[in-house]
Amino acid sequence: MVTFRTGVEGDYDEVNQLVQRAFLNDTQGREWAEEQALFEPDRSVLAVDGDQVVGHVGTFTRDLTVPGGVLAAGYVTVVAVAGTHRRRGLASAMLTRQLREIRDRGEALALLWASEAGIYGRYGYGLASRRLRFEIDRREVRIDGSRFDKSRLDGLRLRAAPAAVHRARVAEVYERVRPSRPGFASRDDRWWDYRLADQAWHRGGAGPLQAVVCFDGDTPVGYALYRFRSNWNDSGPNGEVGVMETVTATPAAYTMLWDFLLNVDLTRTVGMWLGAIDEPLQYLVNDVRRLGMGMGDGLWARLLDVPAALAGRRYATEVDVVLEVVDELLPGCGGVFRLRGGPDHATCEPTADAADLRLDTSALAAVYLGGNSLGSLAAAGRVAELRPGAVATTAPAFTWTRAPHALEIF
Ligand SMILES: CC(=O)SCCNC(=O)CCNC(=O)[C@H](O)C(C)(C)COP(=O)(O)OP(=O)(O)OC[C@H]1O[C@@H](n2cnc3c(N)ncnc32)[C@H](O)[C@@H]1OP(=O)(O)O
């Protein structure tokens, strides 16, 4: 018989083996120091059959930047069920218990990256952010000089080194940018260890992790993390730059860093897998088509405390709306709420007033970070307009200056 329990410290190895098998990973030669340091056993739910762990869901404790604020969130991770025990409800049982535990800790929402996009909607998650992949034919692409004022680069300088050398500067820039960019997550030392981890298997055949930092005087104002992949073919050099993330406090730093990344001798391609959906590079280059862009999904979000989540963000325009939120999995998380908000204030409370809009919790999650338009969800029939005009007045409020961007898979 399968039973469920909370994890303990000694579970890591068995859980990790289960997870690696479930994700079809070859574990040979891998060490897990950085991953193990992130393990929060008391936030794991395990399924156990006899003496064997056959299922696992984990949670990390982190803060998420939302439009105009930062909220504690449960970061859901390494969901796995043994191949011998699938499609008999184990994941559903663990994921539902996990959502209740996240809510009971007072975290207003759960977040995850999905291995397959078909899995999580049934648990109330909505796709809240997207990413752009880039595969740039770098010889065809350059920063278009007519689109920016070169004098803005005066006084800036770049310094490139193995990433570990620049760790403090990189973390300093990230902390400066994080509070204002929806989708960014808090990174303590353990998370920097994970992000900068550089064992052979983290490299995926490319070289060591590099950082290039942009300084304005002595102040770091931007950085890029990247790897080179050396390659040659019959025509000569065919190397690649693989960009992991670029974080910048100013447009000038962004321009200077991308100019550097696009001009590495002996390379032909610049790739980035987790670019922002509104990546400014699109608006800077001479030939946008040659950026080789493709869209992917990003963060999935699940609201667990609707009033706290809605009052915890800010709104692009003044809004006063009554939302009926339908939550089939956790009915206690749904209800009718009046949201009053604007660029510098927000309140949200249960109300007995008639609802203006009705939507399910996954549709609300989809618009929560400003990554999808409420109007688009309404066009899909996912938002019911109970008071005529309510979509038109509410949709602009849920947008934000920048699209949400999740920088790393956890
Ligand atoms: C945040 C993350 O960690 S994402 C990683 C998820 N894990 C993986 O992809 C690893 C490989 N897969 C697995 O380990 C398992 O197949 C899991 C964890 C995805 C599902 O575990 P199971 O115990 O089989 O799920 P369970 O029996 O509870 O089924 C849950 C529902 O999800 C559905 N489902 C499961 N996998 C998929 C899928 N890949 N695509 C679409 N639907 C799926 C099931 O059909 C079921 O639907 P229903 O309730 O409408 O009948």
Image: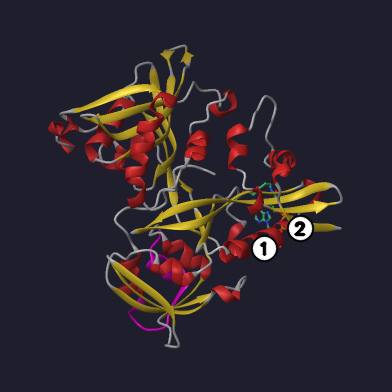
Question: Relative to residue 196, is residue 57 drawn left or right?
Answer: right
Question: Relative to residue 246, is residue 234 drawn left or right?
Answer: right
Question: Which of 232 and 370 lies nearest the eye of the viewer?
Answer: 370
The percent coordinates of residue 146 (x first, y second) are: 15, 35
Q: Secondary structure beneath disc 2?
A: strand
Reading the image, the residue beneath label 2 is 4
Q: Secondary structure beneath disc 1?
A: helix
Q: Are marks 2 and 1 in contact (CB under 8 Å)?
A: yes
The span shown in magenta is 372-390
- Vertical placement of residue 364 versus 7, above or below: below
Q: Residue at x 35, y 51 (%)?
A: 179
Reading the image, the residue beneath label 1 is 97
Q: Amino acid at mark 2?
A: Phe
Tell me the distance, in whole angstroms, between the alpha carbons under discs 2 and 1. 10 Å
Q: Is residue 409 visible?
A: yes
Would you identify the image quadrant in which residue 368 lies?
bottom left
Picture quarter with ligand 1: bottom right
